[in-house]
Amino acid sequence: MKKVLVSGSGGFIGHHLCRFLKKRGYWVRGADLVHSPFLKVDEIDEFLILDLRIGENCLKATEGIDEVYALAAMNGSIEYTSKVKAEIVHDNVLINTNTAQACVDNGVKRLFFSSSACVYPINKQDTDEVIALREEDAYPAMPDSEYGWEKLFSERMYKSFEEDCGLEVRIARFFNIYGPEGHYDELLAKAPTAISRKVALTKDGKVKIWGDGEQKRSFTYIDDCLEAIYKLTQSNINTPTNIGTTDLLTINELAYLIGKIAGKKIKLVHQLDKAQGVRTRQSDQSKIERLLGWKRKVKLKEGLKNTYDWVKGEL
């Protein structure tokens, strides 16, 4: 039985991935600062409470492991990542450098690293013109945030360990992964869960939206993301690969769609002083479709309904 480590397994994608891999017959160890409140005892073989900013703890986490899924990171909404810069860069770089070295020291064969669409240059995303971001567009580099710079550095760091030390590395750039069992508070949540919370709680129909709401995004449902992660990790694709969809819409359209799902007539209140990130962010999916035959299965409306129903139930 192949043994895998999921770092960041207390988080949204991490705990879903533990469950996904366990169902496929893997022996699964999780490691994080906190245990996921959603992960049941029989959905994981071992869970270690560890601070992965400490090298010794990364050695402990990777001991006896064949494959590592490196998801541990500080992350959150655009407002969070634009305000908490030093801590994000400091902590995430420590986690990743320690993880890479521990993998080499413990003879781990392969590592998956969860990068981000935030690595892409701001000049390709700062107007209403839609430019589908291809993997090669990451250079010349000019990410819109320090979080994006950290992700880009970590990609290069892991690839250096591949070239110098033989660690096989697979890298995905995520485009707005969403679904049930994630953060839904305003500061840490992504747009689908944050807006679902606002819609569920509104009594007068008013829903606050950061910025003018005309910023465009595409969203990827968690189940589709997990399948793509797995396919990519088991493949021979050793260059960064987008995991996203082409279902582009404005945040205003997203809010109205969630309102429709909730059966509520909503009125948007725009907060122009709030962070809203880049103007347009769209994924080019041609690489993963061509090389892995992967396409999203869960349509946006279905995924949003699942997410809204879960958030409403939690509230």
Image (cartoon, rainbow, N blue to C red):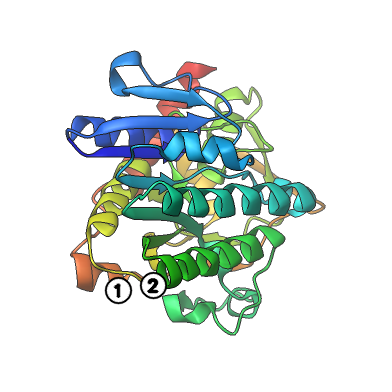
Residue appearing at x 49%, y 70% in the figure: 160
Q: What residue type is disc 1 on?
A: Lys
The x and y percentages for residue 4 are 31, 39
In the rendered image, the quadrant that contains the N terminus is top left
The x and y percentages for residue 175 are 46, 57
Hey, which quadrant is residue 25 in on the image?
Answer: top left
Alpha carbon of mark 2 to alpha carbon of mark 1: how far? 8 Å
Q: Are marks 2 and 1 in contact (CB under 8 Å)?
A: yes
Horizontal placement of 274 versus 216: left or right? right
Q: Secondary structure at mark 2?
A: loop
Which is closer to the viewer, label 2 or label 1?
Answer: 1
Q: Secondary structure at mark 1?
A: helix
Q: Residues within 10 Å of mark 2 (few under 14, many from 20)?
A: some
Q: Give residue 235's mark.
A: none
Mark 2 = which residue?
A: 284
Q: What residue type is disc 2 on?
A: Asp
Mark 1 = which residue?
A: 287
Viewer-proximal residue among 46 and 104: 104
The x and y percentages for residue 168 are 34, 62
* 213 w.r.t. 291: above or below: above
Residue appearing at x 53%, y 42% in the figure: 72
Horizontal placement of 49 versus 294: left or right? right
Horizontal placement of 295 versus 202: left or right? left
